[in-house]
Amino acid sequence: MTPAQLRRAREALDTFLIETPSWGFADTGTRFGKFFQDAAAIDLGDKLADAGHVHALMGCCPTVAVHVLWDFVPGEDPKSVAKLARKHGVKIGAINPNLFQDQEYKWGSFGNSDPAVRARALQHCFDSVAIGRAVGSEYVSLWFADGTNYPGQESIRARKAAFEESLGALHRKLAPNQTMLVEYKPFEPAFYATDIADWGMAYLLSKKAGPRAKVLVDTGHHYAATNIEQIVAWLLDEDMLGGFHFNDRRYADDDLTLGSIDPYQIFRIFHEIHLFAHERRRRPKIAYMIDQCHNEKPKIEATIQTVVIAQELFAKAALVDHEALLRAQLKRDVVTAELILKKAFFTDVSPALASWRKANRLAADPLAEHRRSGYERTAAADRRRRRKEMGISRGGSFA
Ligand code: PSV
Ligand code: MN
């Protein structure tokens, strides 16, 4: 790397924060079953401890996304949760209401044709907004499992109208510093007509809800050939990109490690963000978050691996020569334009990462440092013992 490239990459890294998900540290599975890990977090305290450990190693993961139903005990003072997070050196990030797990939501939540269920879902979101206020979180992050499975099952437009109404009501409850993120997903669990199936729907609903509603792009939630960076560029241009859920995928929602399948795609997404910042002379406010549940990899290792690859790709994308790119575009020199991106992508940014870590008093190799620390072994022993004491049995199938 040249000194100028090193500086650019270092500056980009200074701006890059990425949120870890509480659910990424706990036992998770597929639709077909769960495979347990001894070191998996049992409760929110464990999740925050794991997130704190990751942040101590990485220096760029100061917040933890929480899922209300999975992480909050009913009646618990959210302030005590914020305190617990502080104890572990992190803060509570995006608040994720759970609008998909209860029996009431069999036919949907905001899109349900039953006004009583819609009211219940909305109340849960109001409670989530209140939790966000209490813990000082800026984001309420919404994903809906709503949709229908068969043609003719329900009125598609009635469901759209129901969403418009509830999202508008929720927006009115937001505090001035709160943003609501609207996530989309092409299918699952609804396989015929998902209510918010793509970015256009999420955009339209957010726009109608109000100025503090933005679109959340989960990189896994697209069909295989979708050009995600084009979606990102459009949303940026419309000031409607609120955040990301990072993962990689083979089909549409695989929750694989970011960049494990297609690192160049993530690079191209970051390139659009850097290019926007360069042209507009301002960094867009984007909540970068991880949404991965690892069943095969140890969870903390997979999280560290994800953050490292995100930093690498973000730094690489910062090296694109924007002026040279513009010149090539004006000359219609397609080959040079493409090569400018490739050149940045193939630049080894490890010197920049090493220097950034050193300046931030972090270990040179976070994964090696984590393995050396014995954190995983200690956590596994402690959590095995506590599970035994609590009588938590993890045998059998589909627990
Ligand atoms: C749904 O597939 C999703 O991407 C939403 O963001 C949920 O909150 C999350 O996964 C749960 O893992
Ligand atoms: Mn997601």
Image (spheres, helix red, strand yellow):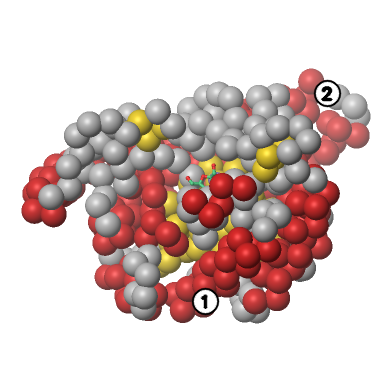
149 up-or-down from 80: above or below? above
Residue drawn at x 34%, y 74% as measured from the top left: 76
Of helix, strand and loop, which one carries label 1? helix
The tag earlier along the polypeptide, 2 or 1, is 1
Q: Quadrant of residue 377?
A: top left
Relative image position of residue 301 (x, y in whole percent): 31, 39
Give the amino acid at mark 2: Val
- The residue that label 1 is drawn on is 130
Residue 203 visible in the current orientation: no
Residue mark closest to the camera, 2 vs 1: 1
Relative image position of residue 8 (x, y in whole percent): 58, 48
- The residue that label 2 is drawn on is 334
Give the amino acid at mark 1: Ala
Q: How far is mark 2 from mark 1, CA to CA?
A: 51 Å
Residue drawn at x 71%, y 32% as measured from the top left: 150
Q: Quadrant of residue 346?
A: top right
